[in-house]
């Protein structure tokens, strides 16, 4: 579903948001602290803080259906992925460098736009015991970069 | 609702874009980024509708809506639960959002892509702060309540319209820390706004005009609501608006174009606030800055409150000046005049006045000056009253809401700026004198 270009893109200094809906259609969302590909690139894993995401994680356990956006502040390039089989896995300490690298990459994106570093670091503050990994198989991918092609499905190119 | 919406409005400016989540009828979630959130009141926000996308389809299919907003000052995050109510495609809210979006579009390289199709209005059902650390916000640049209190006292002490205008400008500079500003009066009959005072520009631009509906100032006047833009955008640059209006104006009662509107060509932040009283638009207060996002919701609140005070005071002084509070002074012989004669030329077609071939003013203010100078030349008359001008058939004031006092202030200031030896000064409520210290040659064209 994801071509190599978009697979690389979602692992750069993008802003990440993950959403899932409850039985009453009310969605909830949280910021992701980073992203990696698993299962040979067939699945996406997003790092989430459970202390901020009680409702989101309940919704994922209930339905497994997620929407996930990635947007690069400097270019507005935006991609949305959808999944139907999301599950929640424990965080592995070996992935801490991915989160640290994501924060570094995100800072490099937003500091030139004038955001104070202290605010960004506070937004991404975490402890290893307050992290989980949400893993899903993308079944649809859309460009949401503002413009005439917004909303178009992304054709998968190997 | 424990968190009041008015206390988290910094999250709305789009410095950290908000996220919006919806669901389709099957419960499949969808996420998108928001370019702006508009504060309506503590129970309502408006979101920009720019594209017919999945979010829009879900909303029209009655999806519940969640927003995730982030403060760029504290890093606090908030989840808001919303219910869609309706879409507005014209009017004050729409124009406020359209102007703001033009700035955001230009700032983010999306000029020509972002276009407001509607303002979607939502009721707020819940606001929840997301768990997590925050930082202390930086101290605000000033305390607007204190500024407003001091300005209120200073405005209350003014004796006439002229003093009120001077004090109002001084308050905006001293109390509110505004560095560039203009005060424009509304000419109801001609659908124009004319600059009566300004601060912070190389040339005052007093007497310059802008049509109602043009640029930030003109749209503020037409919609009678504040218009605020946080980033430079050519779409709302008034130079362009004015040129377009002049081009469309043709001849006849043409826009004042001989006096350029003051203003920062590179203004990033612009805000115009209507001055109204008793249901009438009296004028517009305009402030600007070279800095991005210089004016926020708090600054807007403060200037709207200030403009309300100013409007009531203006109305009071305009009306008070119609009543004389002193007996008419006996006509005194004016001192003899010397020096080279000043040629004063009047063009009856538009009441424009030229002093020694230099343009001074036109319209009602031009007609007034011609009457004053004619009476002076014929009868050495120097004392005049507002009441007398109002019934003078040579002036043709446009009815009750003629802003006569404001037009006299405009004339007085234009004469002062040009330093041509003709001056006006108030001698009491509804009374003023003309002083001429050079011989005049009056020429009617």
Image (tube, helix red, strand yellow):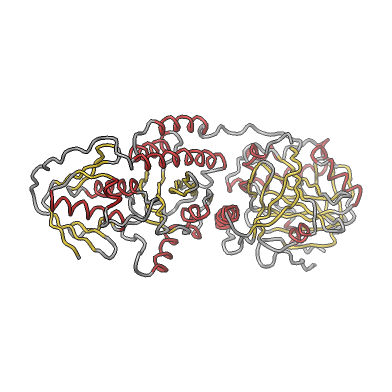
- Residue B25 is situated, as x and y percent measured from the top left of the image, at 85, 58
Above or below — where is B445 with respect to B420? below
Q: Report if residue B104 is visible in the image.
A: no
**Residue closest to the far right:** A62
Q: Quadrant of residue B127?
A: top right
Q: Nearer the viewer, residue B91 or B426?
A: B426
Residue at the spot x=75%, y=39% of the render?
Answer: B128
- Residue B414 is situated, as x and y percent measured from the top left of the image, at 27, 49
Q: Nearer the viewer, residue B30 or B259?
A: B259
In the rendered structure, the answer to whether residue B347 lies left or right of residue B222 reads left
Q: Nearer the viewer, residue B173 or B265?
A: B173
Above or below — where is B282 with respect to B214? above
Q: How many marks?
A: 0
- Residue B40 is situated, as x and y percent measured from the top left of the image, at 63, 46
User: Which quarter of the figure is the C terminus of chain B placed in?
Assistant: bottom left
In the rendered structure, the answer to whether residue B272 lies left or right of residue A60 reads left
User: Which quarter of the figure is the N terminus of chain B placed in?
Assistant: top right
Q: Nearer the viewer, residue B294 or B58?
A: B58
Residue at the spot x=80%, y=54% of the render?
Answer: B63
- Residue B110 is situated, as x and y percent measured from the top left of the image, at 59, 60
In the rendered structure, the answer to whether residue B100 lies left or right of residue B357 reads right
Q: Report if residue A91 is visible in the image.
A: yes
């Amino acid at each position: 579903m994801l071509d190599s270009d978009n697979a690389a893109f979602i692992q750069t200094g993008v802003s990440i948001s993950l959403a899932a809906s409850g039985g009453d259609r009310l969605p909830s969302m949280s910021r992701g602290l980073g992203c990696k590909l698993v299962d040979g690139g067939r699945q996406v894993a997003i790092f989430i803080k459970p202390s901020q995401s009680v409702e989101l994680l309940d919704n994922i356990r209930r339905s497994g259906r997620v929407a996930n956006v990635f947007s690069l502040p400097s270019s507005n390039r935006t991609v949305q992925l959808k999944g139907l089989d999301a599950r929640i896995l424990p965080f592995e300490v070996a992935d801490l460098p991915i989160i640290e690298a994501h924060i570094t990459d995100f800072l490099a994106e937003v500091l030139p736009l004038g955001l104070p570093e202290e605010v960004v670091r506070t937004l991404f503050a975490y402890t290893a015991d307050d992290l989980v990994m949400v893993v899903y198989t993308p079944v649809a991918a859309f460009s949401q970069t503002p413009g005439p092609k917004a909303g178009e499905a992304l054709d998968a190119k190997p | 609702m424990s968190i009041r919406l008015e206390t988290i409005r910094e999250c709305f400016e789009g410095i950290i874009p908000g996220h919006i989540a919806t669901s389709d009828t099957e419960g499949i979630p969808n996420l998108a980024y928001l370019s702006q959130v508009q504060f309506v009141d503590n129970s309502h926000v408006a979101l920009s509708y720019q594209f017919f996308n999945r979010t829009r389809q879900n909303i029209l299919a009655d999806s519940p809506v969640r927003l995730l907003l982030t403060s760029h000052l504290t890093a606090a995050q908030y989840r808001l639960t919303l219910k869609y109510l309706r879409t507005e495609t014209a009017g004050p809210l729409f124009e406020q959002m359209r102007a703001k979006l033009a700035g955001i579009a230009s700032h983010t390289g999306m000029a020509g892509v972002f276009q407001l199709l509607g303002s979607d209005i939502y009721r707020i059902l819940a606001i929840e702060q997301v768990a997590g650390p925050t930082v202390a916000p930086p101290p605000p640049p000033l305390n607007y309540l204190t500024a407003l209190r001091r300005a209120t006292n200073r405005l209350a002490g003014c004796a006439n319209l002229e003093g009120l205008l001077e004090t109002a400008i001084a308050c905006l500079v001293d109390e509110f820390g505004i560095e560039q500003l203009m005060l424009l009066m509304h000419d109801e009959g001609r659908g124009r706004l004319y600059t009566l005072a300004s601060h912070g520009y190389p040339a005052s631009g007093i007497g310059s005009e802008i049509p109602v509906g043009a640029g930030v100032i003109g749209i503020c006047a037409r919609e009678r609501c504040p218009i605020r833009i946080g980033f430079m955008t050519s779409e709302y640059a008034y130079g362009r608006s004015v040129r377009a209006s002049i081009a469309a104006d043709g001849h006849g009662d043409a826009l004042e174009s001989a006096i350029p509107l003051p203003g920062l060509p590179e203004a990033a932040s612009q805000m115009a606030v209507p001055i109204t009283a008793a249901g009438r638009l009296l004028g517009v207060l305009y402030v600007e800055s070279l800095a991005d996002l210089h004016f926020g919701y708090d600054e807007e609140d403060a200037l709207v409150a200030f403009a309300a005070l100013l409007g009531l005071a203006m109305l009071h002084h305009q009306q008070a000046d119609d009543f004389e509070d002193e007996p008419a002074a006996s006509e005194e012989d004016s001192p003899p005049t010397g020096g080279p004669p000043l040629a004063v030329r009047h063009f009856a077609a538009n009441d424009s006045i030229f002093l020694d071939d230099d343009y001074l003013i036109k319209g009602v203010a031009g007609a007034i000056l011609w009457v004053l100078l004619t009476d002076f030349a014929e009868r050495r008359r120097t004392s005049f009253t507002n009441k007398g001008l109002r019934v003078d058939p040579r002036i043709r004031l446009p009815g009750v809401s003629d802003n006569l006092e404001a037009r006299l202030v405009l004339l007085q200031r234009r004469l002062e700026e040009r330093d041509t030896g003709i001056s006006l000064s108030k001698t009491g409520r509804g009374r003023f004198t003309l002083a001429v210290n050079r011989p005049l040659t009056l020429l009617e064209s």
